[in-house]
Every structure is written in structure tokens, then in C-alpha cells.
């Protein structure tokens, strides 16, 4: 793409035109997490390892759903 500014405007307009869908976003996240596990990039020895990240993501998702 040669006109990167036009592409950026298109992306911004598209994002604004789509209503937020927290359930869809969570399904996408879960699918990407499962794929990462299958690839061996998301291996946990301790089930609580990384819980801080999950809590932070939950807070962010919950705060986004209240705004809309």
C-alpha cells in the first residue's frame, strides 16, 4: 500500500464503525491462547503462573464493557 495515510484513516473509520463485542473478543483471545499452547509457546508448569496477566486483562475487559 503506497498511501499509508489513507489506509490508516480507513482502519480508524472501520474500527469506529464496529460496535465493541466483549464476548467476541474473549472468544478470539481464547482461540489465540489455545493456538499458542498447541505451538508450545504457552506452557505453564504452575497453574497460577501468569495469573497477574489474566487479572489485568479481566480488569481491562471489564472496564471496556462498562463504557459501551
Image (tube, rainbow, N blue to C red):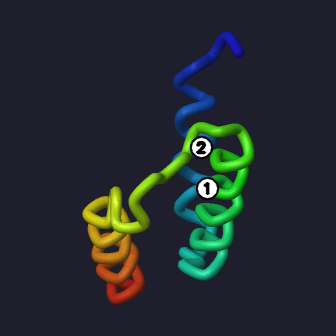
**Residue hosting label 1:** 33
Residue 66 position in % (x across, y down): 34, 89
Q: Quadrant of residue 30?
A: bottom right
Q: Residue at x 66, y 74 (%)?
A: 24
Between residue 66 and residue 45, name the one nearer to us: 45
The quarter in which the C terminus is drawn is bottom left
Q: Nearer the viewer, mark 1 or mark 2?
A: 1
Report x, y in % for residue 45.
45, 53
Asked if residue 24 is positioned above or below residue 11 in the image, the reply reads below
Q: Residue furthest top?
A: 2
Between 14 and 23, which is closer to the camera in this rendering? 23
Residue in the image at 48% along x and 52% along y: 44
Query: Where is mark 2, residue-wise?
Result: 11
* Secondary element at image label 2: helix
Q: Quadrant of the N terminus?
A: top right
Residue, x 69% and y 57% (percent of image)?
A: 34
Of residues 4 and 41, the one nearer the viewer is: 41
Crowd tier of the residue under label 1, counting other residues whose Cα lies within 10 Å: few below 14, some 14–19, many 20 or above: some
Horizontal side of 32 relative to 43 (left or right) equals right
Q: Would you call the spot at circle 2 few (<14 residues within 10 Å), some (14-19), or many (20 or more)?
A: few
**Above or below, 23 relative to 39:** below
Q: Does 13 sit above or below residue 64?
A: above
Task: Please tell me how many numbered marks the rendered image carries.
Answer: 2
Using the numbered discs, state the Cα–Cα distance from disc 1 to disc 2 in whole angstroms: 25 Å
CB under 8 Å between discs 1 and 2 = no
Residue 32 lies, in percent from the top left, at 66, 53
Residue 61: image tag: none
Pick the front one: 5 or 65: 65
Query: Relative to 55, is 6 on the left or the right?
Result: right
Return the disc, 1 or 2, that comes first in the chain's sequence.
Answer: 2
Left or right placement of residue 44 versus residue 30 in this view:
left
Amino acid at each position: 500500500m503506497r498511501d499509508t495515510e489513507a489506509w490508516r484513516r480507513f482502519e480508524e473509520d472501520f474500527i469506529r464503525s464496529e460496535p465493541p463485542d466483549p464476548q467476541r473478543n474473549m472468544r478470539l483471545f481464547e482461540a489465540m491462547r489455545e493456538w499458542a499452547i498447541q505451538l508450545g509457546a504457552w506452557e505453564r508448569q504452575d497453574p497460577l503462573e501468569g495469573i497477574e496477566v489474566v487479572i489485568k486483562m479481566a480488569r481491562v475487559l471489564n472496564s471496556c464493557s462498562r463504557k459501551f
